[in-house]
Image (cartoon, rainbow, N blue to C red):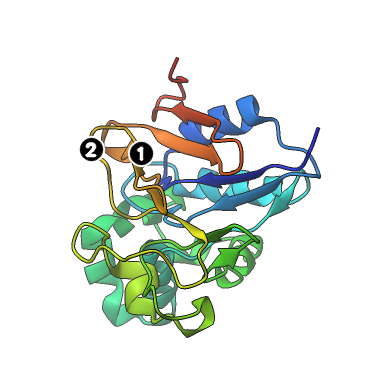
């Protein structure tokens, strides 16, 4: 089987959906899997999501990106004074998944979270969590865009590299991906009752599962 590059949209604690996609994709050591960030918060099983992603390290070439919710989580771990604000935007569900205290986060989970990438690119595609400045190389992008800016508020043009952008963060309430040819948003709002989407960026093959782990037919 030739190498595949597969992006996965915002998971937000929906471990059953992620497990269903991993099962149907059945990744091998030749596959590159690029989760686009926001693994934690809002949904009930953030800890289980991180466990599943860590397990993927031994099955494929995993390149997990940093989302704004992981950034908030890491800040809350380091700075207790911001924890209340984080908990109000979904962090409370993450704390509950770790037994009600951040002190119970395993070392391997902390290593995983602290090692997340800001972006990834191939010869044909670029991958970021949220958005980008079309005129700047990826290593020049500000965190405000990479992590926080929804594409519905500031729609970028085609990136100066000419590569197709694959992003998450902006929830598509219809459950359908946003495909603008040069930009594809695959956050299809699993935690809100939509789907978790995985997209093979070269072939266009797509898999979706809901938060109960049921595949979309």
Residue shown at 47%/85% (left/top)?
Answer: 140
Query: Given this view, does label 1 or label 2 mark the residue nearer the observer?
Result: 1
Looking at the rendered structure, the secondary structure element under dot 1 is loop
Q: Which residue is mark 1?
A: 177
At which x and y percent is residue 39?
A: 46, 52
Given residues 183 and 173, the one toward you in this image is 183
**Residue at horizontal 61%, vertical 70%?**
115
Nearest the viewer among 179 and 128 is 179
Single out the residue that lies furthest toward the bottom: 140
Alpha carbon distance from label 1 to label 2? 9 Å
Where is residue 207? Give x, y as percent. Answer: 51, 29
Based on the displayed image, in which of its 4 quarters is residue 188 positioned?
A: top left
Nearest the viewer among 79 and 127 is 127
Which image quarter holds the C terminus?
A: top left
| Nearer to me, 99 or 75 | 75
Label 1, residues with CA under 10 Å away: few <14, some 14-19, many ≥20? many
Residue 119's x, y, as percent?
53, 68
Looking at the picture, does residue 58 appear above or below residue 153?
above
């Amino acid at each position: 089987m030739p190498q595949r590059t597969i992006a996965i949209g915002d998971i937000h604690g929906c471990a059953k959906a992620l497990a269903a996609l991993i099962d149907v994709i059945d990744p091998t050591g030749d596959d590159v899997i690029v989760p686009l960030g926001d693994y934690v918060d809002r949904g009930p099983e953030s800890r289980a999501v991180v466990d599943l992603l860590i397990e993927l390290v031994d099955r494929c070439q995993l390149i997990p990106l940093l989302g704004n919710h992981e950034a908030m989580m890491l800040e809350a771990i380091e700075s207790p004074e911001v924890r209340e604000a984080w908990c109000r935007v979904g962090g409370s569900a993450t704390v509950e998944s770790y037994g009600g205290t951040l002190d119970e986060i395993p070392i391997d989970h902390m290593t995983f979270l602290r090692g997340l990438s800001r972006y990834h690119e191939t010869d044909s595609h670029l991958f970021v969590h949220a958005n980008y400045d079309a005129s700047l190389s990826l290593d020049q992008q500000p965190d405000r865009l990479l992590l926080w800016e929804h594409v519905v508020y500031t729609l970028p043009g085609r990136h100066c590299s000419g590569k197709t952008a694959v992003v998450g963060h902006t929830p598509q309430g219809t459950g359908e991906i946003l495909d603008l040819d040069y930009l594809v948003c695959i956050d299809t709002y699993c935690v809100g009752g939509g789907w978790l989407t995985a997209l093979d960026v070269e072939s266009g093959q797509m898999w979706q599962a809901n938060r109960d782990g049921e595949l979309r037919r």
